[in-house]
Every structure is written in structure tokens, then in C-alpha cells.
């Protein structure tokens, strides 16, 4: 655990008890500084208290803004990759759909072969239906 994170659990506990949000938390912190420290009155500090607070605020503001930019860029890249995958998948599905329903030109020999295979399949279904009349292969149940 880094030095910057060593008080996170304690501070998160304190923050979670402030239902009024960040304003209430800041009020508590500055009240603590007034009651328990010499932040506002120390003669040993060369900077004014406002300057100390703004200096710390600006330091952490830069860190937070950079982290936000980095996180947003990562989310945007993840979203872009997800959208690209989804688009490619849709294109592939559309291509497969178009491929399966497209009209293909065949030669006379290929057409004859297709007709023969179709006729053979019909004969097989007819033979099976005659051998097993209770099954009704390839026909709707008629009762």
C-alpha cells in the first residue's frame, strides 16, 4: 500500500458517514483543522492557509483530471472495440444470410444432378413411409 493510500479506509469510513455529500465532509475536515490544529493561526507557516489548501487542491485536481481522462480513453477504446466486433458480427451474419439465400447459376449437368438427388430423396421418404405407415415421413399428420 502506498503512502497516498494508507488512510483511504479511514477516510472512506468518515466520508460514508456524511450523507450531505462532499460539502458536509469538507465542513467536517475544516472544522477538525480549526479545533485540533493550528492551520489557521500558525506563525511558523510561511504560506497563508488558503494558499496551502489551494496548493494541495490543485495538486490532487491534476491527478484526478488525468486519471479521469485516462479512464475515459480506456472506456472509449473498449466501447470502440465492442462496437467494431458487433458490427463485424452483424456483417458476417448478413453475409451468411445472403450467401444461403442467394441464387446460384448452375450448368445443365449440375441441374440434372440436383433433380436426381431430389427425386431419390423423395423416393426414400415414400419407401420409408410405406414400410412404417405409423410414422408418416415428410407428411403432415392427418387424423
Image (cartoon, helix red, strand yellow):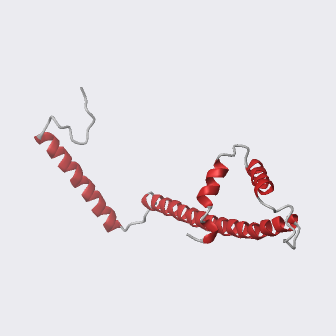
- Furthest residue in direction bottom, as rendered: 46
Q: Quadrant of residue 44?
A: bottom right
Counting labels gives 0
Residue 143 in percent (x, y) is at: 24, 26
Q: Is residue 1 left or right of residue 52?
A: left
Q: Is residue 38 left or right of residue 68?
A: right
Depth order, front residue of 125/45: 45
At horizontal 78% and vertical 50% (from top left) the residue drawn is 27
Residue 124 in percent (x, y) is at: 18, 50
- Furthest residue in direction top, as rendered: 143
At horizontal 78% and vertical 53% (from top left) the residue drawn is 35
Q: Is residue 65 left or right of residue 105?
A: right
Residue 24 in percent (x, y) is at: 76, 47
Depth order, front residue of 130/4: 4
Depth order, front residue of 32/62: 32
Asked if 2 appears above or below 112 in the picture, the reply is below
At horizontal 58% and vertical 65% (from top left) the residue drawn is 78
Q: Quadrant of residue 109?
A: bottom left
Depth order, front residue of 30/39: 39
At horizontal 17% and vertical 37% (from top left) the residue drawn is 135
Q: Quadrant of residue 139?
A: top left
Asked if 34 appears above or below 139 in the picture, the reply is below
Asked if 117 appears above or below 122 in the picture, the reply is below
Residue 48 in percent (x, y) is at: 89, 67
Amino acid at each position: 500500500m502506498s503512502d497516498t493510500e494508507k488512510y483511504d479506509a479511514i477516510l472512506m469510513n468518515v466520508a460514508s458517514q456524511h450523507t450531505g455529500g462532499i460539502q458536509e465532509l469538507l465542513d467536517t475536515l475544516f472544522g477538525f483543522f480549526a479545533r485540533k490544529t493550528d492551520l489557521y493561526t500558525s506563525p511558523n507557516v510561511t504560506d497563508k492557509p488558503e494558499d496551502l489548501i489551494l496548493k494541495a487542491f490543485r495538486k490532487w485536481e491534476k491527478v484526478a483530471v488525468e486519471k479521469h481522462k485516462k479512464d475515459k480513453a480506456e472506456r472509449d477504446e473498449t466501447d470502440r472495440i465492442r462496437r467494431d466486433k458487433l458490427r463485424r458480427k452483424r456483417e458476417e451474419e448478413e453475409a451468411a444470410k445472403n450467401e444461403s439465400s442467394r441464387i446460384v447459376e448452375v450448368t445443365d449437368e449440375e441441374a440434372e444432378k440436383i433433380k436426381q438427388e431430389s427425386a431419390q430423396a423423395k423416393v426414400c421418404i415414400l419407401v420409408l413411409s410405406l414400410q412404417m405407415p405409423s410414422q408418416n415421413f415428410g407428411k403432415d399428420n392427418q387424423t
